[in-house]
Amino acid sequence: METHNKLDQLLGSVERIGVIGSPSTTGELSLDILGGAVGRKLVGELALFRFMQDSAPHYALGQITEVKLRNIWHEDATMRSLIRQRGRVDAVSERQDTHLGEMTVSAVFMTGTKSYEPSILGTVPSTGTNIHLVNDEVLDELLAPFKQQLFYLGRVYGSKPRLPLWFKHFNPGPDGAGEAYHVGVFGKTGSGKSVLAKMILTAYARYPQMALLVIDPQGEFAKDLRGRSSGEFLLPLGGILKSLGKQHFVFSVRNLVLDTWALFEQILFESLFFERLTIPRGENRQLACEILAEKLQKARVTLANLHTRQGFDRAWELLKDEKIQKNIYRSEAPRARFQSMLDEADADEFYRDYWSPVTELFREDRPNARSVEKALSWLFALDHQNRPILVVDLSKEQAHGMFWNDKIQALVIKRLLQGVTQTAEDCYKDNKGLNTLVIMDEAHRLAPRDIPPEEEEAKAVRGTLIDAVRTTRKYGLGWMFISQTLSSLHPEILQQLRISFFGFGLALGSEYQALSQLVGGKSRALDLYRLFRDPHSSFDISSRQYSFMTIGPVSPLSFAGTPLFLNVFNTVEAFMKENHLTVASSP
């Protein structure tokens, strides 16, 4: 009983702010705020009360979501007339004020034989039950058995205690969840979502048995790992990962070798190669790409050799073949036009300007280059003592000298997604969990709600992602989506998320409607969310607050499924200190 007495002793020393009032339910408690606490900030504070249930001591925690002021004398019509003339009536103004709080319970613990065990609020404690503010000492005592699992992203919203969170790997075991979780991080530009996502990546990187893949369309994560991070929160991600023994590599477009003929056909179709040979977009160009790829394979030209002048010359010869031209064009007039263009074209110019930028993507002898299949095989190998992290930088600035645009990026992402899901399926068939998290930045671009009919590549990427989030959880493959918007992200993605973080900027219009559906219409929680202020409205960088609401099994304090609110650390030093992280020095 010493442990339990210690918690009671701690409660005796922390501030008492109120008592349970009436009416109260197991879903929401009314608080009568004590006179000594009415002058302090209470909204967002984490509070705790002790009560008896089934003849055993229980401790319930929750956040205060609202405070109301009532003065029944001021609501009387006669008194209002008097107040209008005098401004206040000394006998009733302020003296007769009552402050009423609303508290939503998020976690309940009962005193077990050795430690505190999860329970539920199965009854409403009596009125007059003391409500105490929670501090770090109380939380540390309550969660002592899980100390090694806890991770801190920030403090309780508008308060001082650290909000304990846990990010478990996806395999069974004491630190594992036993299945994969899909995670969402949402917020307007400048809300701190990218920094939060990097912190979460660090949390998962603590597990040697876990691999991480970051698909990085804008190069945000890659810049951090290269030591070129921008903004005021300069997280030394590379040094932290190194200190955790986590091997990490950044693959740019220049390192990634595309490895399928289907990709070659699609990229050649998108390029200007056939357009300059008078074949416009449509069935004929599609047919030309398919036939050329087929004939090159029969001629024993490999994908890796397409970039050579010999590979181009072979393709040029094949296009001059009358049988191939008849397969592309049935009519004689377009065939004649096509042949005339081939005769007049400068082969050197076509090789340099239209063929080489496309085929360079398939070239294997680039420095530090690796095919998609080999890169994924290396990442997902289960025999690593400390499995690695791979960041695939698909930003345009890395593709100098190659044919690259949003459509090509979509095709490459689709290839990566297919490789990931296929590997996960193969592991599952061998009764092994992949235990991997895939982080998708700019998710609203990759899986939007609405796509124009002509954007076939974008539809294919979205379809692959939707299928993945539906099926890969049991394979031990989780996905984390980072997005500026909720309403424009496909609903199927949102429905499959198990853990979500919502930053500033989702409190209006369709965004707020989508948020309400995800949170389950909990009006008190949404009212508190709407109090979030824009971090950039602060007077200086040091006073900026990056506030988030989170739902899902991300904290030992939220197993009741209620939202929790936090302010993310706004300095790198605080984040690293609270999580005992260090930065390995460069060799």
Image: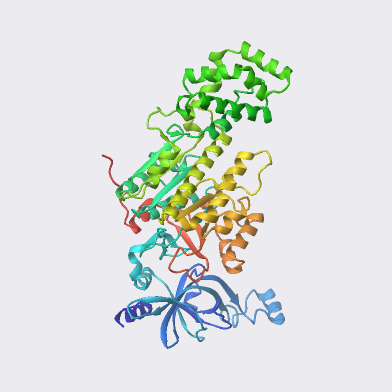
Q: Which residue does the image show at 47% across and 39% down from the upper left? A: 219
In screen coordinates, is 560 left or right of 489? left
- Way the structure is coloured: rainbow
Q: Nearer the viewer, residue 126 or 394?
A: 394
The image quadrant where one finds the N terminus is bottom left
Q: Which residue does the image show at 48% across and 28% down from the upper left? A: 303
Where on the picture, by quarter, is residue 340?
A: top right
Q: Position of residue 59 (x, y in %)?
A: 43, 78
In screen coordinates, is 427 left or right of 469? left
Q: Nearer the viewer, residue 398 or 175?
A: 175
Q: Nearer the viewer, residue 561 or 36?
A: 561
Q: Position of residue 63 (x, y in %)?
A: 50, 70
In screen coordinates, is 166 left or right of 337? left
- Extreme-left residue of the structure: 587
Q: Position of residue 233 (x, y in %)?
A: 42, 47
Q: Is residue 121 above or below residue 174?
A: below
* Residue 276 visible somewhere in the drawing: no
Total numbered labels: 0
Q: Position of residue 529 (x, y in %)?
A: 56, 62
- Extreme-top residue of the structure: 344
Q: Is residue 482 above or below residue 106?
A: above
Q: Nearer the viewer, residue 318 or 443?
A: 318
Q: Which residue does the image show at 34% across and 66% down from the upper left? A: 147
The image quadrant where one finds the C terminus is top left
Q: Is residue 115 above or below residue 571?
A: below
* Residue 103 visible somewhere in the drawing: yes
Where on the picture, by quarter, is residue 256?
A: top left
